[in-house]
Amino acid sequence: MTEGKISKKIILFALPIFLGNLFQQLYNVVDSLVVGNVLGKEALAAVSSTGSLIFLIVGFIHGIFVGASVIISRHFGAKNKKDLEVAVHTTIALGFIAGIIITVVGMSLTPLLLKAMGTPDDVFNNAVLYLRIYFAGGIGIAMYNATMGIFQAVGDSKHPLYYLITAAIINTVLDILFIAVFDFGIAGAAVATVISQFISAILGFTKLMRVTGEHRVTFSRIRIDRFTATRLLKMGIPTGVQNSVIAFANVIVQSNINNFGSVAMAGCGSYSKLEGFAFLPITSFGMALTTFIGQNLGAKQYDRAKKGAKFGIMTGVLLAQTVGILLWILAPILISFFNNEPDVIAYGVTQMRTESLFYFLLALSHCLAGILRGAGKTNIPMIVMLISWCAIRITYITITIRIIPDIRVIFWAYPLTWFISSVVFLIYYKKANWLHGSTI
């Protein structure tokens, strides 16, 4: 990432991430498609209601490994082989520990959190079952995030793509087999997801033990270096906290949607699966920018980092809004794939057409946050998003929904808070010395 044409490097790095996330999103959608069409709207509502809770816990772990990726990319750009090797093995060790934490915390808190969200009785038991099986596979989830973070930090986005394609195919086959053939119910969807995640994690870990570069993993060297772990956590915790608190805000949002009943939950849940496709260019370019900025600042190529940042922002925003326009146009058709009841479709279409024309704001915020993380300034995205996407979003919904008891009030919370975060990020990006003042 420190040599060659900037646009080509970023696109070639982002494209496999995009395709990998596409396959990941597809197998998430397959879960909902099979559940919604075979098991009905109540089961679909149960699966749909779990997304915010999953990200509440998994998002924190993912943030930790974003921090690890920043550290590794800096060492890689600076050609600091010794520290790179230590960081890689510490990251793997943290992955095992994080997996155990996900399982213990996720399985124990699931009923409590679902009750706090006001999950309706007709979907509660299925939601508990799905989440507990999902969190039982915590080690697979954490190790996948750890290994993929290492690959991306050294500029390898192709192998994560291969593993996600494999996982997507396996998940799709198992979904159909467990639900439609063996009649395992909602448990079948959860088991299929867990198995596919474990397989992608095993593939990633096995590859890291066979590569020839400095990021090769040797089993006997996997241990936590205290100094390195402290630096990784210092970089990763702000992003983890940001992810979890935003997820908590979305849990509050979901609880307000739950008050409108299982039909609203099914319709909005269907939209959330489709919304994931809009996140593909956003996530891809955000990750690419973090790695690009990290490696080039490590190599002290400040002008190249600045040019790459501008290109990534423009491309990410353009692609995200293109997807948004397509979703706005195709909304009724796409929502009907999940469930063909008119009321379910109506809720999903209303949310999609409220939010999709503002995806450029979401992309702008994520790209600027990715740039700042690559520069080592992980506290800034955390603070901005906690205030705008959590405090302001919750306050707005809590107050406004009591005055105007209309579900569209909830939908508008997203564009409004995306706008606020984008303005703040732009001001910081233009005014602050984020290039030369970056340290890790």
Image (tube, grey):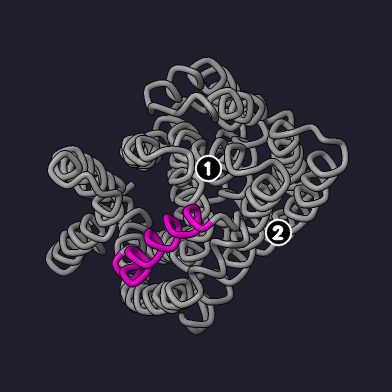
Query: Can see residue 347?
Result: yes
Q: Residue at x 47, y 65 (%)?
A: 278
Residue 10, x across and y down, in percent:
50, 74
| Disc 1 residue crowd, few under 14, some 14–19, many 20+, Cα 10 Å | many
Residue 12 higher or lower than 98, as above or below? below
Q: Position of residue 246 (x, y in %)?
A: 33, 41
Q: Nearer the viewer, residue 203 or 255?
A: 255
Q: Quadrant of residue 130?
A: top right
Q: Which residue is mark 1?
A: 48
Q: Quadrant of residue 433?
A: bottom left
CA–CA distance in space, label 1 to label 2: 30 Å
Please state which amino acid type lies under the numbered disc 1. Answer: Ser
Tell me if residue 179 comes above or below residue 172 in the rendering.
above
- Rendered position, 73 above or below 423: above
Which numbered disc covers residue 159?
Answer: 2
Q: Which residues are magenta?
A: 342-361
Question: What's the amino acid at mark 2?
Answer: His
Q: Quadrant of residue 305?
A: bottom left
- Label 2 residue SS: helix
